[in-house]
Amino acid sequence: MLWCIRQAGKGFGSVMARDERIFIIILIVNLIVSLVYLLAGILFIVPAHSAAEKEDGKEILYDNRRTWLLRFLVMLLCPVIGPLFFFMGHLFYLIVFWKDVDLADVIFSKDRVQTHMKADEERERDIIPLEEAILVNEKKDLRMVMMNVIKEDFQNCLASITLALDSEDSEASHYAAAVLSDELNKFRIYVQRLRKQMQEEDAGQTECEELLLDYMDGILRQHIFSDQEQRKFVTVLTAAAESLYGKEPLRFTAAWYEEVCLRNLECKEFDICEKWCGRMAERFPEELQSYTCRLKLYFARQDRDAFFETLGLLKKSSVVIDNETLELIRIFS
């Protein structure tokens, strides 16, 4: 019996010794694999990617030496599991992402993205209209409003900024002068470049004309130029409209007809305005702008008969009337 126990103890000891040897061998193999992995990454793979990036001049995504060192430590702390994890991850990458993705046919539409930004409550609480700040002439409020306007998209606020030029606060007037000078110079240069490109266009090209019609009206409607320069740019706008009408009259929108009519009406070019009103009435007979532009023209020209005739046609039509036109009908009815 005692002999059997001794033999069993020897057998168990031999099994333990064998398991320890296997464990040590696994650790040694794991250490060798980890060292080979680290040296291959630091001495060969990283320099090769860096040289390829410098040669091609394009950015290449690759792991740096610190990443390889961290992986080496993970492989040491997690024998067998660590190397298998990185090996399987690399194998999965080679199988799934072996070919570069072709994004030539992919279109990212910015129109579908709607960004919601958190309101700046402290800033919004202190906002007052620029006209009120100028009227009160409180330097602190005026300067704060001017800086807030400058930070935002101020292209549609140039008329209000013009009022700050006469402010007693020299700093606020300096802000206004700097903004207006820069913005108006950009407008002049851009319009001049588009005019030159428009003259060099082929017979079927209308891109420059459309850009001029879209861009110029946003500035001209604010009346920030002198009378002479305003008239000059209205002439440019009308020339672009004539060019587009001669090439592709069907591309003309009701909004473009309206802006050409109103800008010429403001310059008292009644004949030109009447011509474009007639074209708009022919192209868009059931649009509200077709009636309102003619009403404004006849009122400015003091043509009483034509005014009331157009007003009567508007009443009988099925056009949807806005509040401004409705008030006009109530006054003259």
Image (tube, rainbow, N blue to C red):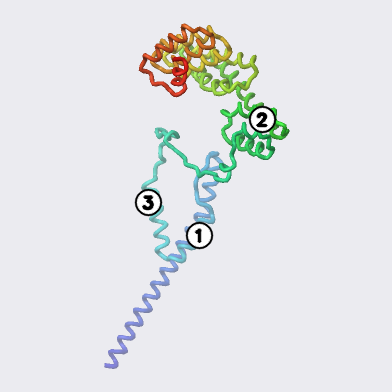
The single residue placed furthest to the left in the displayed view is: 1
Amino acid tagged 3: Phe
Q: Which residue is mark 1?
A: 70
**Residue 188: image x %, image y %?**
62, 21
Q: Which residue is mark 3?
A: 92
- Seen in the image, is 29 located left or right of residue 150? left
210 and 12: which is toward the camera: 210
Question: Of marks 2 and 3, which one's residue comes earlier in the chain?
Answer: 3
- Seen in the image, is 211 located left or right of residue 185? left
Quarter occupied by residue 120:
top right
| Circles 2 and 3 in contact, beta carbons < 8 Å | no
Q: Which residue is mark 2?
A: 164
Whether 24 is drawn above or below 204: the answer is: below
Whether 94 is drawn above or below 144: the answer is: below
Looking at the rendered image, the quarter that the N terminus falls into is: bottom left
- Seen in the image, is 57 located left or right of residue 253? right
1 and 94: which is toward the camera: 94
Residue at image position (53%, 8%) is 302
